[in-house]
Image (cartoon, rainbow, N blue to C red):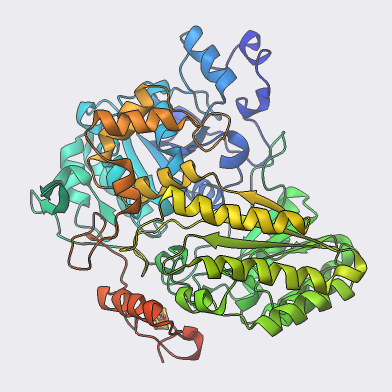
Amino acid sequence: MRYPDKILSQVEKPARYTGGEWNSSRKDWDKTKFHIALSYPDVYEIGTSNMAVGLLYETLNNNKDVDCERVFMPWLDMLRLLKENNLPLISLENGRPLKDFDAVGISIGYEMTFTNILTILDMGGIPVKASERTDADPLVIGGGSSCYNPEPVADFFDMFVIGECEDLISSLIDRFLSCSTNGRLDKKKFLLAVSGLPGVYVPSLYRPKYHDGEFDGLEAVDGAPLKIRRQIAKDLPFAATHPIMPYIEAVHDRAGVEIARGCTRGCRFCNAGIIYRPVRERPIDDVMNAIRDCIDHTGYDEVSLVSLSSGDYSKIDELISRIRHEYGDSLTVSLPSLRLDQHSLELLESLSASRKSGLTFAPEAGSEHMQRVINKYIKREELLETSSLAFSKGWTGLKLYFMLGLPEEEMEDVQGIVDLVKAVQQTGRSRRCQVRLGVANFVPKPHTPFQWEGQHTGEVLTAKHDLLKNQLSRLNVKINWTDTDISVMEAALSRGDRRLCEVVYRAWKSGAVLDTWSECFDFSIWKRAFEECGLDLYHYAQYKRTTDMVLPWEHLDMGISRSFLLRELKKSHDGELTDDCRHGCNGCGLTKTECPMIG
Ligand code: SF4
């Protein structure tokens, strides 16, 4: 089916719902054996730019027996029209309601999209709670970076894939087909069959226990494994080279080639630095081939070399020079996530002699004390030299990202941000260069050394915000903030246990939708949902857990040892740095077969 014109003509961006884009894949429904709808639970422009979704879409559709289609979260106008006209949410390719698929795969990249997941399932004709679904309903599978603590949404999924699923896909499909009769899956049989596979977590096979109001571990039933080991791919999977070309502007309008996965720097607040370990680089010839392929299949004139720290790619200089040699100025290259140092500037200079409008770097902390706490140390002199050099070479603006409310942070550390920004501004004053700030509130993330820490209270965060605001407004420095209420929600949902499923459900029932959008987010709905469930939102966000407590995500084994995380936590309290593990293994717990960097 297709949405009728009379519906599409009433929405702001009809192309969000029509499909048919270049590089999309429309297969014959009746000639394929396994149908999966893939979703990123936010609107089309965001979901379609998500690299993980793009890679999975291409991987799955490369299998001739598989039909992988896409579905995203409708915007408010479309949601209203679908409800008023009693129309289901349909896939972009064959226009099928989600309930027709064998499986729905949802890539969760941000906790604030949890209620969108429920909307997508519900509008697709699928009961939102796994316990209410039958064998006739699709299997609902979760994955992605916000699944490393899936407990707050465990009730809505049949299974999660923890880690890199590329190697798992074919065995999951084989088992799916072998557990199906006449096209109907025996779900229980299938879930029991896959629950022992590395990287597969079936939440219905685990019962949570609580003691004195706190989570006290999970009990495995039906022989499910006590720990679920993250699936780690030995090498990077092939690079997706047929990205979908949207008809409307998406958040990323360029080709993206992943040059490396993982990061060796060991910033203590960063969960990506843990859950994507170890570092695996794509060989330089493969990167060049992927760029060529991508450009051929899209016509893009810009490519982003994607990695958590692209300047750390061991052959980055050679790569840039090969791209320059082959494409000259006809291809713009962007390097996300560069460190603020002179090498980064040299790289950026070699990329573009003309476009020097703005630079973006993330020092995260302003004082040496905090840099040591978080293990992201950049010498102040080096930072100022780099900014001075950048301004002298023609860059006219610098955006700096900081995090507020980090563990151990005092007011003088916030003052340190002000002092640093003043000094940076001074380096560009004679050229009237602009310094801007992006400020996020610290959220203690699962599986990091800071997983035991709590978030600062709203009063403390507000006082810190005020200090920054008052002092920097005098300097005419523009600041972008993350809303404190959103940060509280993010912290509670990131570190919650299974009791939060009911909170998410009630919030959704009460109208929480598109919470990542400030115009839609309604904090009062969430506060009420927590109250109705007899749970304390602020406790979840701010409670500092002791290291002998069981954490709601500890049954998911990232391969990083608890002793390593505790060691890093202690070092943060002592202000001790841990060196980049390219200079020597820090013994995080990965094995020799998993980490190519262990000598
Ligand atoms: S095993 Fe060693 S080298 Fe590999 S990621 Fe862990 S600390 Fe770094």
> Who's the residue at 55% across and 29% down the image?
92
Decide: is 501 above or below 57.
above
Compared across the picture, whether 529 is left or right of 45 comes to left
Which residue occupies 60% across, 49% down?
481
Which quadrant of the figure has residue 453? bottom left
Question: Please, is residue 137 above or below residue 6 in the view?
Answer: below
Quarter of the figure with residue 373 = bottom left
Q: At x 57% / y 72%, what residue is drawn?
A: 282
| 364 relative to 209, above or below | below
Decide if residue 592 is on the left or right side of residue 201: right
Using residue 68 as the reference point, say whether residue 315 is left or right of it: right
In terms of image quarters, where does ligand 1 lie? Answer: bottom left
Viewer-nearest residue: 332 or 180: 332
- The answer to whether residue 594 of the structure is visible from this angle is no
- Expressed as whole percent of the image width and height from the top left, the position of residue 179 reads 21, 40
Q: Taking the image as drawn, is residue 334 in sight? A: yes
Q: Residue at 18%, 49% (x, y): give it.
A: 193
> With 381 as the anchor, is 159 left or right in this view?
left
Quick one: 531 or 513, which is closer to the camera? 531
